[in-house]
Amino acid sequence: MAAAAAPGALGTLQASRARLVAACCAPLVPGWRLHRSLAGARVSPAMWARGWAPAAEGAALRRGYSSEVKSEDELRVRYLEEENRGADLKERVKMNPSEVGPFVSKIRAVINEMANLPVPTIAAIDGLALGGGLELALACDIRVAASSAKMGLVETKLAIIPGGGGTQRLPRAIGMSLAKELIFSARVLDGQEAKAVGLVSHVLEQNQEGDAAYRKALDLAREFLPQGPVAMRVAKLAINQGMEVDLVTGLAIEEACYAQTIPTKDRLEGLLAFKEKRSPRYKGE
């Protein structure tokens, strides 16, 4: 069931347990598709959340996961939540060895595209996120979970290893030693345990509706919405790239990213709004 949102509001989609909330500066309509790298791929519908694309003069735009710069109608925040055990193992057992490698490569490519989106992404875990489900969450900027949620990279239990970025993103999130322990043991954590090791930023007691993490993610998205779109994009870029290099290089990256905000109309609007004691009206320009 589709729902439109007013400019600057949150549009929501709910299909079974899969939800997506997009905070944007245009009305929302259904029409988001997977990246072309997954065209024709055998991907279980349970693996990926549905999506939204912004409207353009009333017409739906089909967009895939992309790190390319978008128009001023770009999504400002993307929120993904899915009760997800990861790959469909019943489907995988039917594959011959020559199919498995390309299949996992396509999944990895989509998760990488998710990580490279130029807008903030929030993953909420209200149920299960095992294997590929957790790898998708690890590619998001922020993770929130209900206390009753279950998550883990359990691939070694199946005599394989995480193949969607888990061996790289989990150590970066919680540290090498602890990441090794969790991967070697295929241990499953609940929300409180995940918060204790730094895997999620927030943990909430589950509510009767079963959407505590979902509601927290909405609250976070509303905090992000008023900020300047260009600033949000380059802040994410500076953090992501800076974490992969030494401090001196990271500071140079920050300087280059800051320089991108100086000539923007939004920066001048922010200063004028501060002077006039009103909320800024940013346009992503």
Image (spheres, rainbow, N blue to C red):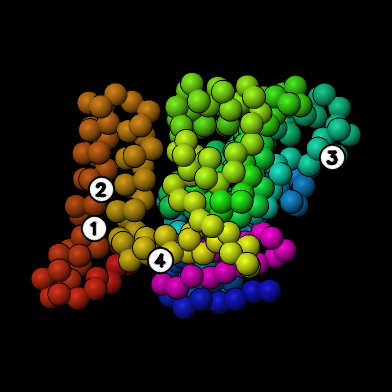
Label 3 neighbour load within 10 Å: few <14, some 14-19, many 20+: few
Earlier residue among tags 2 and 4: 4
The structure residue drawn at horizontal position 46% and vertical position 32%, both measured from the top left corner, is: 174
Residue 260 tag number: 2
The picture quadrant where one finds residue 188 is top right
User: Disc 1 vs disc 2: Cβ atoms closer than 8 Å?
Assistant: yes
Q: Position of residue 262 (x, y in %)?
A: 19, 52
In the image, which is nearer the foreground, mark 3 or mark 1?
Answer: 3
The kind of residue on which mark 3 rests is Glu
The structure residue drawn at horizontal position 64% and vertical position 74%, both measured from the top left corner, is: 2
At mark 3, the secondary structure is helix
Instruction: State left or right for residue 49 relative to residue 53.
Output: right
At mark 1, the secondary structure is loop
Considering every residue shown, the one lying at the far right of the view is 94
Earlier residue among tags 4 and 1: 4
Residue 161 tag number: none
Above or below, 80 relative to 140? below
At mark 4, the secondary structure is helix
In the image, which is nearer the foreground, mark 2 or mark 4?
Answer: 4
Label 2 neighbour load within 10 Å: few <14, some 14-19, many 20+: few
- Tell me which segment is drawn in magenta: 8-22
In the image, which is nearer the foreground, mark 2 or mark 3?
Answer: 3
The residues bearing labels 4 and 3 have C-alpha atoms spaced at a distance of 38 Å
Q: Which residue is mark 1?
A: 264
Earlier residue among tags 2 and 3: 3
